[in-house]
Amino acid sequence: MTANNNQNAEALKKSAKKQSPWAIARRKLLRNKLAMISISFLVLVTILSFLAPYIAPFDPFRVDITNRNAMPSGTHWLGTDNSGRDIVSLLLYGGRTSLTIGFVSMMAVVLIGTTVGSIAGFYGGWVDAVLMRFTDFVMNFPFLVFVIVLASIFRDAGIWALIIVISLLGWTGAARVVRSKTMSEKENEYVMAAISIGGTPFKIIRKHLLPNVMTTIIVQATLLLAVMIVAETALSFLGFGVPSGTPSWGNMLQEARQPHVIRSMWWIWIPPAFAITFTILSINFIGEGIKDAFNPKSVR
Amino acid sequence: MSNNEKLLEIKNLHTGFDIEGKTYHAVKDVSFDVKSKEVVCVVGESGCGKSVMSLSIMDLLPKHNGKIDKGQILFQGKDLVPLNTKEMNSIRGKDISMIFQEPMTALNPVLTIGFQMDEVLINHTKLKIEDIRKKSISLLKQVGISRGEQIVHEYPHQLSGGMRQRVVIAMAIACQPKLLIADEPTTALDVTVQAQILELIQNIQEEVGMAVLMITHDLGVVAEMADRVVVMYAGQVVEESDVDRIFYNPQHPYTKALLNSIPRLEEEQEELNTIKGIVPSLKNMPLEGCRFVDRCPEAMPECKKITPRLGETEEGHSVRCILYDASRPKSEGEVRL
């Protein structure tokens, strides 16, 4: 009898779950072809990158002076670079670096941005004023100069220095978006109702406001992931990002700064350029797809 | 009834809003009390300060510009006005709880009904989480929702307006409050559901033994529910008495006009009776004299000069109108309130 009841309860829970806003959005996203193709592509790239140590044909650090700038061939599918390193292996290891930087700094940025934004938006008044002026202050730092200086100082720390620096400077946009969404969300009567049953401010932010702001945060996070990967690439291309010994997509592109590489050695710079372009493109399509899925007005 | 039975006592409450550096009082000098297990209805047009008064009790005024300027709100003899948020939180939802006008918006759209109901009990009791869920389901049964086990897993958008209001009521009575504030609980519902919800509130009031402070502009609701009636106009109490005397022997011209504007089935009328004009806005409130003077059918020249006070014309019946001697200021020095 009790077992039967439990089973019943489980079934009820399951059928009700199908109607949750999350489930509805998930169904919409699954029907969005472009987003699904993009997700598959991103997942594939991520898996390949993180499996680099097992599947890469060569050691990406192995310098082979006799075999510099080799054309694509049977042994080196995409040729070798200036120092004779295998491009395919570099691409795989580089993807690991670039994606790690992208994902970790995106998480950090979302965390800082959400905390600052939701507190500022919920409390308003002087709390809001102080936090937002601080946000403006950080936003006004010349990003590139700051990152270049800090990254040069902490060069020994490798990619983690870069992650910390771009996270500490990159959260401002997310904070503003979360703040404005929180402000419009807290005008709803359910917030007043939550206060009227004795909820503390922290609880109300966590349990009532954040779930409602979550859709905005997820969309922001996807777009930020793309921004962070681009930031890594741009900085590395300029020679101030990932230390030059570590392979990354940006570092690979760095070689294309030399005119003769651009002109006659396409196999050195086309593969990383395509990897970056398609990864960013797919991330942006995913972001758009998620935004669409959470929009109650879209029918797709 | 003796004094110690007073559950809620509002004394000279002044609630104001800061607009462009000036304070405008939406509630000006309101005093009345609610005894335990009593249903008190506050009636008046839109913009009379009824809702602001009820939000003042719960300390839910908009933080950026609303504030209680003067006065006391005594709940079981303890003044709520000076309490901080933490102390208020231990009272809100436990001893005093509130039902809102719009059941559509009073529930969080992305959380399940069960999650939201559990929260009241999590806030105020030390029960285990499984017991809390059981209690939530039994509360839903108490408000007439039989599919409780299923509803707790559903989202607000899956329920009808009447069901949501039942959920809101279930949340409000979860901790067996001593006072329930209902701010126009039936306004957003259709007529057939209105009657059910009122009946539910009445039954629960008897079961739980709580007092109800009902804010409404529907005199039908008042006749149905109230023990006592407080008539508010432009932020002031203009008449207060028990329900029979308000309906059969109204004294203030505003109360008379309100009652007169209810259409009666037995009379054939070409037009509905209305009260001319609108409630003066906060910025245009007359500084002295009666606030109803411009719309009053019985206005006299001196109404614009003498500010009436709330006086008892007979035991348990107070009026604020200089037609009655009790409302005239006692001495010249008291002309301005």
Image (cartoon, helix red, strand yellow):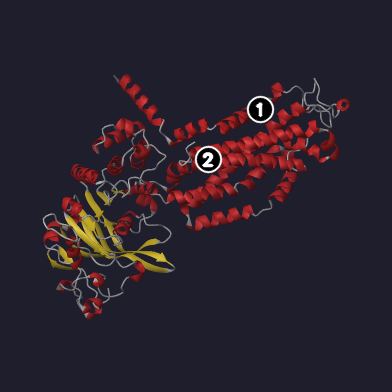
| Residue B64 position within the rendered picture, expressed as x and y whole percent measured from the top left | 43, 59
Q: Secondary structure at mark 1?
A: helix
The C terminus of chain B appears in which quarter of the rendering?
A: bottom left
- Name the spot of residue B9 as percent of width and height, x first: 24, 58
Which residue was labeled with disc 2?
A291
Between circles 2 and 1, the one closer to the viewer is 2
Query: What's the chain of the residue with tag 1?
Result: A
Q: Which residue is mark 1?
A: A50
Number of numbered discs visible in the structure rendering: 2
Q: CA distance from mark 2 to mark 1?
A: 28 Å
Q: Which mark is residue B184?
A: none
Which is more toward the observer, B198 or A147?
B198
State left or right for residue B235 relative to residue B262. right
Bin the neighbour count of mark 2 within 10 Å (Cα to Cα): few under 14, some 14-19, many 20 and up.
many
Q: Is residue B91 visible?
A: yes
On screen, residue A34 above or below B255 = above
| Above-or-below relation of B195 to B25 | above
| Residue reaching furthest to the right | A66
